[in-house]
Image (cartoon, grey):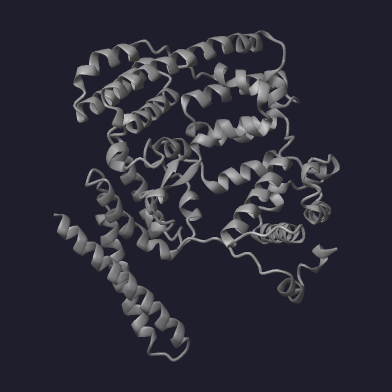
Amino acid sequence: MRIELLNNPNYLNKTIIRLPQKKCEFDTIALKDIKDNVCACCGRKLISASTYQKFWTEITLPLKTAIQGNWFEKVKNCLPDTLNYLGEMSEKFPNKSFDFIFSNPENFEDLRSVIQDDMHYSGKNYANNNDWFAQVKKYTYVLRSFSRKHLQPASVIIENMKPFVESLDSLKKGIYEYFREKVFQYPDKSLLEIIREPDEATENIINTRLMIDERASVRDFHFNNVKELICSKAPELKEKAEEIERIANMKYQRNLEQSNTRYLVKEIYKEFLNDYDLNDLQDKIMSELDQIPKSYRSPESFLSYARISYTDAAIIESIINGAMASEDHIIPVSDGGKNYFDNIIVLCRKCNKERGNTPYTDYLDYNEQMPYFVNEQLQTVCKKILNGELNPKYREYPLKVVPKIVAVSEGKIFPDISEYVKESRKRNNTALINLQNLLLYPENEENIRAKIEEERHFSRQLDYFEKWQNEQQ
């Protein structure tokens, strides 16, 4: 079996060129993994990557159960050796889940290597390393999804979800509360089985769906009328009108309080009409917006769809996903932005999806609180750096990201990291003096000189930032 040869370098070198890791300048996962961080847009407390991973290790069933239940049957033909490898790992860790076993970086890298070997022997060829990477990532995701086909009972899931509650919006909290009440009645059932239980609450969910569909169609009808009014007057603004409609729709999904949502959407359209000299359409468009019914998103609306097409894993993802920490590129990749740490701030996935590739100069018009929360997030990062909780290489992150976000937002966002710069300068000067003193001793001279160069490089970064800061004043 080829898997037994994984540790034989001669075999690997002759068989296939190993797939390289796709890396940024620095590993940006550390930014998503900062605990007690907040979304730089809405300010909600974020669920860090490691917390999320740990949650799944607690609620998934052992990999051995998945192997015995043939949960991976659909990939048996295309990944035969991978399944054999999973079988070996399930014997090695009989009571551990897929998520737990492959949360270990070494095990995860071995899994990627085995998947790549299977792809190679199946005769598949890809043009470049990025294509190989994408396919391995896809198969890894598929295997993880299959391993979550069945989960622990709902009572275990809800108990482990408690730390996330403060990060959830009001809609998702309502869904969580629904399940929290039900698990006392059905402690051994799955989330999906609870939704499908024939009781009064379930009947209400079913009846709600008709109302939800009707509201959604009415909402789409009026938004479409608004778009047609704009396009009839200014056809060249069709794409812009569609973008405004998308943002307005996201506002209805975000807010459950109808009066606030309608006010925000009206303000968005008023500003748009004013910017493009279409004020003569304002009365008609406001009339259309007034007819949009109350928000169609509610716990009942979510559950009405979940009971038909969702799995337990999909229900959990839908509840938690919006509060997950995610990388937002200050300059969108589609506009030439790089996947470097100095082009990234952390947003919740909901805000990240809402922003899309909208420039910050436009996005801030609908999210006026963002400058405050960007500053709060950077203060948290600076504190973690000074406390030694992040890799020292991240010392440069605030110095590089602040000028970029100020430039992109045209000065609308201007975080204050002066205290961080002051403290960093003090520590940098002390470190240089101490390292110079250590050169008096011959031991480890090479390492000491390398550290001196690192500190000098950081000193230059502080100089550049202070020069930039003085220019802004």
Please tell me which residue is depicted at 76% across the width and 70% down the height of the picture: 7
- Residue 257 pos. (x, y %): 40, 18
- Residue 280 pos. (x, y %): 20, 18
Is any atom of residue 264 visible in this view?
A: no
Give the position of the N terminus as an image quadrant.
bottom right
Q: As displayed, is residue 105 above or below residue 162?
A: below
- Residue 426 pos. (x, y %): 28, 67
Q: As displayed, is residue 405 above or below residue 221?
A: below
Q: As displayed, is residue 341 above or below residue 365?
A: below
| Residue toward you, 303 or 360 | 360
Q: How many marks?
A: 0
Q: As displayed, is residue 229 above or below residue 72?
A: above
- Is 148 situated left or right of 48 in this image? right
| Residue toward you, 287 or 5 | 287
| Residue toward you, 242 or 236 | 236
Please tell me which residue is depicted at 71% across the width and 57% down the height of the picture: 124
- Residue 451 pos. (x, y %): 41, 77
Residue sitting at the far left:
473
- Is 226 situated left or right of 37 in this image? left
Residue sitting at the far bottom:
442
Give the position of the C terminus as an image quadrant.
bottom left
Please tell me which residue is depicted at 38% across the width and 54% down the height of the picture: 336
Please tell me which residue is depicted at 73% across the width and 71% down the height of the picture: 12
- Is 106 situated left or right of 445 in this image? right
Is any atom of residue 216 visible in this view?
A: yes
